[in-house]
Amino acid sequence: MSVLLTQIKATIFAGNRITPSNSLSSELWILDVDVPTVPFSPHLCMRDHQGRRQSNKMSIPHLFRCPISLDLFTDPVTLCTGQTYDRPSIEKWLAGGHLTCPVTMQTLDDTTLVPNHTLRHLIDQWIRGDPDRSSRPGPTEPAAEPQLSLASLKLNLQSPTAAAADAVKKIRILSVESDIGQACLIQLGFFPLLLHLLFRSASAHDDSELVEAALDCVLSLSPPSQLDSLNMLKEEHNLASLVVLLEQGNIKIKTSLCYLLELVATSPATKELSLLVGRSQRVLRELISLMQCNKRNAAAAEAAVRATAGLCMLDENWGNVIREGGVGGLIAYLSSSPGQKTVSRALATLELLLGQEAGKSAFAENANAVRVVVRHVFVVSADREASEHAVGALLAVCCGSVRLQTQAVEAGVLTQLLLLLQSQCGSKAKSRARALLKLLRSVWAGNPGECNFQNDK
């Protein structure tokens, strides 16, 4: 990309904290092109704003509204606190004797109002890019080129692959690097359009770069209020498209799809879809395969664990995950010294699956399973839940199995349990540790006993 992208990075802003920049007066920062300078007209803004309210065809993005008046900015200015307001509104506030920022309530050491040129250009571009606008700009207000508007980007997403790819690149810049741009994209309905591009456009699958960019955009946007759009994947051909991408995509695409599946699995709006995905042998096999490649690609393995853990939030999916090798996949992941961020989730998911007889059988058939879980009984880390789930998993499988009890003792679980009890772990972990010690005591005493504890509180 050109020098403009360097300028983009230098002028990225977060939320309502926008760094004013006069250098953008002749360039719109979100696009890799030069555009004519367009004078900002408050009267034009208000005229278009009134027309929008009458037609009600496009709502104003909330970040284009002044926090005081709740109306469209006409002259955005920024205080020393980083908050932006409409000049008439904030001047009235200050004239009333208020020396605080209306949003943060911070005392103002400096009441200077700095023009926010970046936000002003975005608003002007949004206004001129509305395809429903009936009025035309006057001779002193040349229209922005159509390809420069968010509305035009929206149209380009539904165009042939070349135009769509170009639009997705620009959308990724907005969605990943700018909170205000992200909010605009969400409110203007880009999330479902990007899903449509990903899973309904067969031609897009041949372009890995396009798929990667589109997935980045989808994951950056994914608004809770619009997650029901993911239910498009309940249609057979759309789900088949996801499966093909998961199986044949590069490792970055696979990783992003895992995070998308986690989103599907954890949203109440997509419960039925989660059950549908949980019945897909091809999806589950791919997730388990990715979990087992932790040494080669830790990021993909971690994402696969998160997706699998999400699917296992529904007990209807447990049997399917076990049948496709989920227990072995989690053991393989835990055996390769994974990052602590996902260890607890992997162990919690394993504990859930071991509550099923099929899960216990799969665990017992895995020669490394006991040794791997014992290793996680006591680990010095900030995540104390990992130990709790490791002990819980051992309790589930050792109860009633002398062979697994013996394996646990030989793997050094007694030392691990004693260290855990002396640590600052939670009461639940200690309760489980004492129960496991009580169970295993019969092993070295030569009198294996039955599991007679249900005091896990």
Image: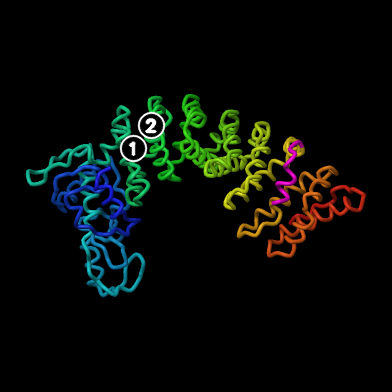
When the figure is inspected, residue 286 is found, relative to residue 31, above or below; the finding is: above
The C terminus lies in which quarter of the figure? bottom right
Identify the residue at image location x=15%, y=40%. 135
Residue 183 vs residue 372, the one in the foreground: 372
In the rendered view, how is the structure colored? rainbow
Q: Amino acid at mark 2?
A: Leu
Residue 239 image point, x, y percent = 50, 28
Mark 2, secondary structure of its residue? helix
- Taking the image as shown, residue 12 lies to the left or right of residue 362, namely left
Q: Residues within 10 Å of mark 2 (few under 14, many from 20)?
A: many
Q: Considering only order in the chain, which callout, 1 or 2, is on the residue closer to the N terminus?
A: 1
When the figure is inspected, residue 424 is found, relative to residue 315, above or below; the finding is: below
**Residue 244 covered by magenta stretch:** no
Mark 1, secondary structure of its residue? helix
Disc 1 designates what residue? 168
Residue 400 vs residue 371, the one in the foreground: 371
**Residue 369 covered by magenta stretch:** yes
Task: Give the CA separation, mark 2 to mark 1.
Answer: 10 Å
Q: Amino acid at mark 1?
A: Val
**Which range is magenta?**
365-375
- Taking the image as shown, residue 100 lies to the left or right of residue 211, namely left
Contact flag, marks 2 and 1 (Cβ < 8 Å): yes
Residue 325 image point, x, y percent = 66, 34
Disc 2 designates what residue? 197
Picture quadrant of residue 157: top left
Identify the residue at image location x=81%, y=49%. 410
Residue 248 image point, x, y percent = 49, 29
- What secondary structure is the magenta-colored segment mainly? helix
Residue 84 vs residue 304, the one in the foreground: 304
- Taking the image as shown, residue 440 lies to the left or right of residue 18, namely right
